[in-house]
Image (spheres, rainbow, N blue to C red):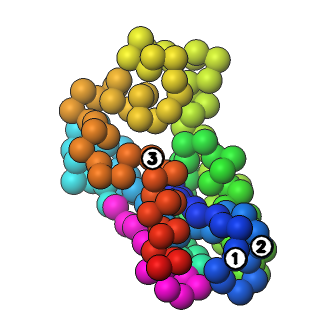
């Protein structure tokens, strides 16, 4: 499972960037090691990357992402709202042709967890009409909450990272 955070700005910070281009600066990867994910918590590996905000970090992000997603071989990849995550992968593949083949394999093998909630195929009253993962996940596991996170939304993460870029 993977998720990107991106930042965009009117004035490009890095070489080979465009105005308002979504630049990934962070990712989180969770890998299920076996099919006992409901029974055991130690069978999930977590990997992440957060750029320093100083240098053009995109190649480092790509290489680390590939290493983290492929550490157990090619698999099935899960995203929540895959259109955004796949868009990030595709742009990185175009930017770094040397990594295009593997990034496009990940792209092609990505499924969308949100699909299970569309058209009310699965619905709980606790969703409160929202398909946000911050509403759906806690509805299935009462022990899970996003309330203790210092950064609550992706837009907040982008704002904080933009401050890091330009200060």
Residue 133: percent from the left, percent from the top? 46, 35
Identify the residue shown where x is 52% and y is 68%: 162
Assign a secondary structure to mark 1.
loop
- Check residue 69 in the rendering and tell me which mark sits there, or answer none: none
The mark total stands at 3
As measured in the structure, the alpha-carbon distance from the residue carrying label 3 to the one carrying label 1 is 23 Å
Q: Residue furthest top?
A: 125
Q: Is residue 69 left or right of residue 58?
A: left
Q: Earlier in the sequence, mark 2 or mark 1?
A: 1
Label 1: which residue?
Answer: 12
Identify the residue shown where x is 57% and y is 62%: 6
User: Which one is in front, 2 or 12?
Assistant: 12
Label 2: which residue?
Answer: 18
Q: Earlier in the sequence, mark 3 or mark 1?
A: 1
Label 3: which residue?
Answer: 153
Identify the residue shown where x is 77% and y is 73%: 18
- Magenta stretch: give its range: 46-57
Q: Are marks 2 and 1 in contact (CB under 8 Å)?
A: yes
As measured in the structure, the alpha-carbon distance from the residue carrying label 2 to the one carrying label 1 is 6 Å
Q: Are marks 3 and 1 in contact (CB under 8 Å)?
A: no
Q: Is residue 44 left or right of residue 108?
A: left
């Amino acid at each position: 499972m993977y998720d990107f955070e991106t930042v965009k700005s009117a004035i490009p910070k890095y070489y080979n960037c465009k105005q308002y281009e979504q630049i990934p600066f962070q990712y989180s990867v969770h890998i299920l090691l076996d099919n006992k994910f409901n029974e055991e918590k130690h069978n999930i590996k977590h990997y992440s990357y957060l750029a320093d905000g100083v240098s053009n970090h995109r190649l480092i992000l790509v290489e680390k992402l590939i290493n983290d997603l492929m550490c157990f071989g090619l698999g099935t990849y899960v995203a929540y709202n895959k259109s955004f995550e796949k868009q990030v992968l595709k742009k990185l593949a175009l930017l770094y042709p040397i990594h295009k083949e593997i990034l496009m394999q990940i792209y092609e093998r990505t499924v969308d967890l949100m699909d299970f909630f569309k058209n009310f195929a699965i619905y709980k009253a606790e969703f409160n009409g929202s398909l946000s993962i911050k509403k759906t996940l806690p509805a299935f596991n009462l022990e899970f909450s996003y309330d203790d996170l210092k950064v609550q939304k992706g837009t907040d993460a982008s704002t904080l990272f933009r401050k890091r870029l330009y200060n």
